[in-house]
Amino acid sequence: MGICRRFSTSHGWLDVEHIGHACVRFSFESGYTVYTDPYSEAADFQGAPKADLIFISHDHYDHYDPSALREIVDDNTIFITAKGIGNLMSCDCFSNQVTELANGENCFVKCISGIIGVKAVAAYNINQLNENGKPFHPKGYGNGYVITLLSPPEMEDENDFVIYFAGDTEFIPEMGEPESEFAVANLALLPKNLPYTMSDEACVQAANAIMPEYLMPIHYFELDSDYLRRGLNPSINLLV
């Protein structure tokens, strides 16, 4: 298991734990449990808390993994996914509620602690190409998610806690746009591995463009935390 950190939010305390690879578990004070991209080769999910909500960024085997899902899904689990995942889930005999989002689309989830706002955002490669010369993750293929724990009365304000789960992406121009949805994140979960996502340098560039309060690297095989600390803006807290 990776780093775990507790945050105070309008939904009560929230424990954020990097389970492994791109999988992060969010455990709410209310008992509500959320996962991103559960992956059975990164962790043993047998006996893990059941999921109320699961985010799937795209359909690669290390992000959509039926073996991991079967351990944590029950009849009440709902999914927010990239386009096309619902059909895969039906083929794998899941009958859960699925909301598929394209980049730029949003939805809201009502949970026992309040309302969660979700916006699907771009996640793609620019420089990292496969042997055919095409991006590992073309623009529009998968999602990142901006996840907002809305404060009562469920209208966006400065007390909302915002999580940016980046999915599989490089440092993309959208991250540096003024007043972008990325720039409101309290916590950014950024992938850091080559050739599929970001180098150490790109991860630092992305974080410094977004300027979250906290950065939790995910999806890495190895991590040079000293390099990241030297390059990050001093106001960003690195969670490793």
Image: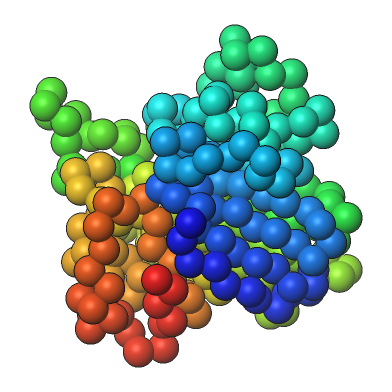
Rendered image quadrant of residue 68: top right
Residue at the spot 75% in from the left edge and 25% down from the top edge: 96
Looking at the picture, tell me which residue is in the foreground, 44 or 53: 44
Q: Is residue 84 left or right of residue 50?
A: left
Q: Residue 201: image x %, image y %? A: 19, 66
Res. 51 in view: no
Residue at the spot 57% in from the left edge and 72% down from the top edge: 5
Looking at the picture, tell me which residue is in the foreground, 221 or 123: 221
Res. 132 in view: yes
**Residue lying furthest top in this view?**
91
Q: Residue 183: image x %, image y %? A: 48, 70
Looking at the picture, tell me which residue is in the foreground, 68 or 123: 68
Looking at the image, how many numbered discs can be counted on the residues?
Answer: 0
Rendered image quadrant of residue 66: top right
Residue at the spot 40% in from the left edge and 77% down from the top edge: 238
Q: Residue 88: image x %, image y %? A: 56, 17
Q: Is residue 105 left or right of residue 137?
A: right
Q: Name the quarter where the C terminus is drawn.
A: bottom left
